[in-house]
Amino acid sequence: MSSKVYVTRSPTVAARKLGDETMIMSGLDSTLFTLDEVATIIWEAADGSKRLEEIVDSKICTEFEVERGKALLDAEALVEGLAGHGILQLSNEPLTSPISSRKADP
Amino acid sequence: MSTLMQEMSAKALELGVPLSVQVDLTYRCNERCVHCYLDHDDHGEMSTSEVKNLLDELASAGVLFLTLSGGEILLRKDFFQILEYARELTFCVKLKTNAILIRAAEAERIRSLNVDSIQVSIYSHRAEVHDAITKVPGSLKRSLDAIRFLKSYGLKAIVADVLMRQNAQDYPEVRMLAAELGAEFTLDPTITPKMDSNRSILGLNVSGEALQRVFRDESLIGNVEEFCAPPAKADEEALEALPCSAGHTACYVSPYGDVYPCVQFPMPSGNVRHTRFLDIWRHSHALKEVRSIRLRDLPTCSACAHVTACTRCPGLAYMEGNMRGPSLQDCEKSFARTGIPSTNLLSQAASLHGLVQIQASSPQSSVV
């Protein structure tokens, strides 16, 4: 697993933002997951056009007081876990995300 | 319900988010089930663009769980267009259908759109019973074939059985049939009044004795002793609970755009053809009134021994004339479950005291 990968939301899942979190229902086995605030930022940015490290640099390191190396390691672990559940897709090439990321009205 | 789902529901309640919405796309149907609560004429269904606009609004309002039902959803020519759009908006979509229009091609399309589950109504393992209920010869075979198609594409199918006088003894076999098909099984023991509150079909409800048998079926209920135990005394905290999720984290939209707290709670709350869904959800006087009610506010039920364990449906109570009142059908279920009459049943029996002498076989007289 490398932070050089492109990440995109899987078209099989159902997802909705609830407050700062995101609820995600796996399309594989209907398991429900929740993403915390930071994971939600990565999820929303995962449109297949950016590498994971670009997302971490532009969305995480600018918003949170976190050391870049640790942020990258945490993001890699998160993305690997979500990919294992079929929630994110990983690629060495840019991808087009087939699903939208919609927030609830405030 | 999983712990995580409970947490999410609690958070949705706190934030005022309608987590689950049922949209009936049509009341038209290709079956004529004897117990159905709907008028099957088309009185002006929402167009494709109206439905899509509604789905946009529901997604923006935070709805995750979207149930598409009817009527028979596949009678809409634009059904797959709507379904595809719903999935683009990342709803977790559940379908309710009689499935008789589902063949391999439809099952494959549903699979490709990653639908969460498809609930199919099966009333008996015997064609003569099921087809007599739907009034469509051959409907059992077609529905079962459809479930097989759905399962062959790896979809989650749910067999939904409704208990009524015609099929009261068949549910164990329907349950076995569901298991053979690899489908989940649900059993609903309640026939509900028609949407216009016409109660003529309630005579189809099973007898109290039949309900008692169901509630003591260990294979269905699990721990019968626990399930049928006398209700625990309610404390003050328990009386602060909400009657149900209708209008709190869930609601219903009819094919004509009418918003109700629940499909079984047809209290007019607004219409999405005139008002944005979120404005109805947040500002409807009807929904605000529903949300204001706690168990302690129910004049009869708050003093009833069953108050915290009862399945009381505020929608059924509403259709009986008072959404804060008891729901007789749920009183009867609590009695069948525990053998302890509800405050409402006792009150009704008392008011019929004079009649009991001359109608000794009436259902009310058997309660006391």
Image: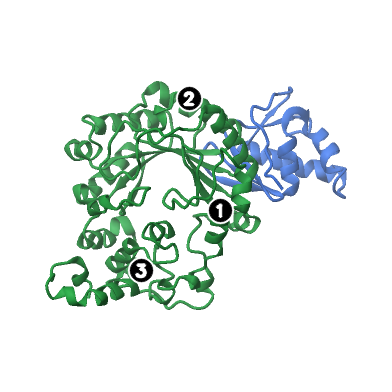
* Host chain of mark 1: B
Residues under labels 3 and 1: Cα distance? 29 Å
Q: Which disc, if any, is residue B249?
A: 1
Of A49 and A69, nearer the camera is: A49
Q: Name the residue under label 2.
A: B78
Of A29 and B17, nearer the camera is: B17
Residue B330, placed above or below residue A45: below
Report the quarter where the C terminus of chain B lies.
Answer: bottom left
Type of amino acid under label 3: Glu
Q: In this view, does B354 lie to the left or right of B116?
A: left
Could you say which chain is coloured green in the image?
B
Count of numbered circles on the image:
3
Q: Earlier in the sequence, mark 2 or mark 3?
A: 2
Q: Residue at x 35, y 68 (%)?
A: B226
**By what rule are the colours in the image chosen?**
by chain
Residues under labels 2 and 3: Cα distance? 47 Å
